[in-house]
Image (cartoon, grey):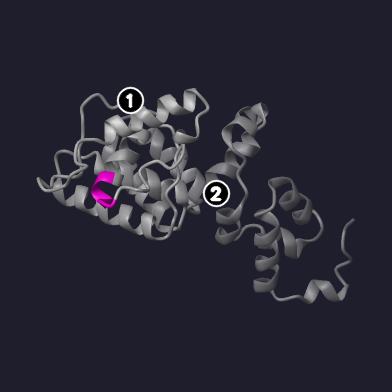
Amino acid sequence: MTIDCSSKIAFIPNDIWVAITSKVASASIRDLYSLRMTCKAARDAGEADIVHRSVSIPPPHATPWWWCLSPEAKRFFDRCMAAGHPELLFREALRELFIRRNENVGLQMLNSAASTGHAAAKYALTMTLLLRTDDNDEKQKGLELYRELDATGSLVEGEVQMPRIEEQHTVCASPRCSTRGHMPLLYDYRKRAAERNSVHAFGGAAHIPCIQCRADYDLQAFVNLP
């Protein structure tokens, strides 16, 4: 239903319209387009960058196949990408890093997505930095990010699927650490327990006191995702 321009609702300030439209966009793309069809104020508010950053993007497996064939859909997602949509930045960062092999561009985009608070992007950035063997400063930054995720309980397994890593990487380098070097064995134990539906499959490395060893365990899980 189209709103009469003479209605009082037409005099709602633009910033209020933008806030409303952003809230609707975070629910679904369909709801956003339905709102934008109601009146000029809603249509204009829908052009704001914050609205395009707030759009709820469905996961790849739930995305309608015809979206990739629609010029209108492509323009819309390009607009969201230009506005800095965290989920789209995250997905494109993975393509740049692991498909196109543009490491600098990929890391920049992954940093941008992570800085918005995108959980999977922050996790992927953490693991990617920890896997660096050519830059100790970057690896140390990855460990600091890991500490932040661990402290807030934000560590999650299986958020993203990464390419197979062939060489072994170790975060813990302390000669006094009693659990150093044992994380691959613990990971293998948990994995086999999961195959047997055993209760021993749960817990990861949460009981390990060394946070660097816990990071090593999560790296094992990260690079061995199915």
Q: Specify whether residue 102 is painted magenta.
A: no
Q: Is residue 9 above or below residue 2?
A: below
Q: Which of the pair 87/161 is nearer the observer?
A: 161
**Most foreground residue, 137 or 215:** 215
| Residue that mark 2 sits on | 80
Instruction: Name the residue located 23 percent from the left edge and 35 percent from the top edge.
Output: 182
Location of residue 30 in the rendering, given as x and y in whole percent from the top left corner: 74, 46
In the image, residue 77 lies at what x, y percent?
Answer: 57, 43
Disc 2 residue type?
Cys
The residue sitting at 44% across, 53% down in the picture is: 154
- Find residue 164 and name its label: 1
Instruction: Please say whether residue 142 is visible from this viewpoint.
Output: no
Q: What residue lies at 39% left-to-right and 50% top-to-bottom?
A: 122
Magenta stretch, main secondary structure class: helix
Mark 1 vs mark 2, foreground winner is 1
The mark found on residue 219 in the picture is none
Give the residues in magenta.
209-213
Q: Is residue 210 magenta?
A: yes
Quadrant holding the C terminus: top left
Q: First in sequence: mark 1 or mark 2?
A: 2
